[in-house]
Image (cartoon, rainbow, N blue to C red):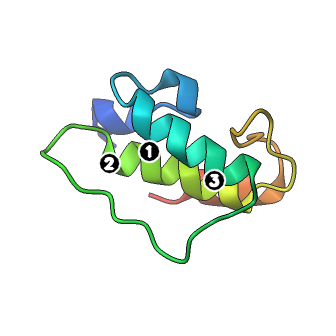
Amino acid sequence: MHKALYRAYRPQKFEDVIGQDHIIKTLKNQIYSDNIGHAYLFCGTRGTGKTTVSKIFAKAVNCEHPVDGNPCGICTMCKVIGNQT
């Protein structure tokens, strides 16, 4: 089965995302302060990382043991969210 490159090599933590430093800082601060909003709107042109950042953010918000604002990647919730297409 063919898998697109953007799916195979999607960043798994905030530090791996390039060119969205202001967004990453804002989202990590939301996680640190435990002040998560009820909705977030990710908008922009194609290929800017909207889906990637939202997937990382979803993992971090639901992660049982976030590390430095990033999802741990080993808890049950991280694995469940990571296995979804």
Q: Assign a secondary structure to mark 1.
A: helix
Q: Quadrant of the N terminus?
A: top left
Residue at image position (31%, 40%) is 49
User: Which label lies toward us, 3 or 2?
Assistant: 3
**Residue 66, labelled with which disc?**
none
Q: Callout 2, which amino acid?
A: Lys
Q: Alpha carbon of mark 3 to alpha carbon of mark 1: how far?
A: 14 Å
Q: Which residue is mark 2?
A: 50
Residue 57 is situated, as x and y percent measured from the top left of the image, at: 56, 51
Q: Alpha carbon of mark 2 to alpha carbon of mark 1: how far?
A: 5 Å
Q: Which residue is mark 3?
A: 30
Q: Earlier in the sequence, mark 3 or mark 2?
A: 3
Q: Residue furthest left?
A: 45
| Front residue of 28 and 15 | 28
**Residue 53, labelled with which disc?**
1
Q: Is residue 71 left or right of residue 5?
A: right
Residue 42 is situated, as x and y percent measured from the top left of the image, at: 32, 57
